[in-house]
Amino acid sequence: MRTEGRAKRLPRAVRERQIMDAAVDVFSRLGFHAASMDEISDVAGISKPMLYAYLGSKEELFATCIRREATRMMEAIATGVEPDQEPDVQLWSGLRAFFGFVGENRASWLVLHRQASTQGGPFAVELTDMRGRAVSLVAALLTQSTKAPATKLEAESLAAALVGAGESLAEWWLDHPEEPAGVVAARLMNLVWMGFGDLVDGNVWHPPSRR
């Protein structure tokens, strides 16, 4: 639907934010291929030439949206973690911040995960970068909280498992929006902390010996 009128002159940062907000909305609803620059310019309330002048081609705009939404999500998680609390509370506060962000910004998650992961190419690289930042954040938390020293690889592998579980549960949640964010976060917390809790205390499971 065409927006009435055209926007007046605004500072560049404000205009770019306006364009990306519109683009995230359109990409999340229509998908990358079906979304058009005409639709995005209409939602943003600017001309298509101005859209290209500010943020380039549709591919460049989509990549910029992925980077912005990934940064917003990571900032929300980092801000939500309570570093002065016990390890379980730190992890819980991080999970709660993650699912809170997804719940309040479903269009962002659709662009970040469903759209970016299915397009491949340079968009998959942006998604990999976001996932790497999330893994690093969780790995740092595990390293700081465990009583038994964890190697960098051990911490990263466990963090990758948690990040993957979080992404999968968030994807499931998109199709079950009636579930409250806190309930979904608590389910994952209960799943992972039963194992991480032992690791924090230095208790490690070993497979039985075979003779």
Image (cartoon, helix red, strand yellow):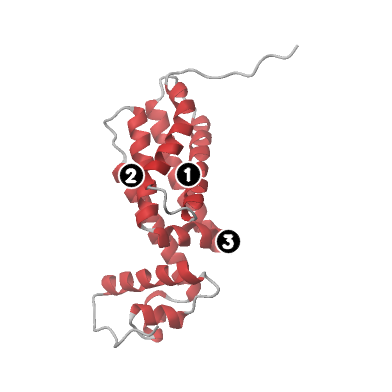
Q: Determine crowd level at label 1: few under 14, some 14-19, many 20+ residues with C-alpha closer than 10 A.
A: some
Q: Mark 2: few, some, or many residues within 10 Å (few <14, many ≥20)?
A: some
Q: Earlier in the sequence, mark 1 or mark 2?
A: 2
> Which residue is label 2 attached to?
78
- Mark 3 vs mark 2: in front: 3
Give the alpha-carbon distance from disc 3 to disc 2, as whole Å.
27 Å
Q: Is residue 196 visible?
A: yes
> Cβ–Cβ below 8 Å for labels 1 and 2?
no
Residue bearing mark 3: 118
- Label 3 Cα neighbours within 10 Å, binned few <14 / some 14-19 / many ≥20: few
Give how far across and how far down residue 210 sits, in percent: 73, 14
Which residue is at the front of the view, 56 or 95? 95
Q: CA distance from mark 3 to mark 1?
A: 18 Å
Q: Is residue 53 visible?
A: no
Q: Which residue is mark 1?
A: 166
Q: Residue at x 35, y 56 (%)?
A: 104
Q: Amino acid at mark 3?
A: Thr
Q: Nearer the viewer, mark 1 or mark 2?
A: 1
**Tag 1: residue type?**
Gly
The numbered mark, 3 or 2, whose residue comes first in the sequence reads 2
Which residue is most to the right?
211
Is 30 rendered above or below residue 120? below
Percent from the top left, x then y, of residue 59? 50, 71
Q: Quadrant of residue 82?
A: top left
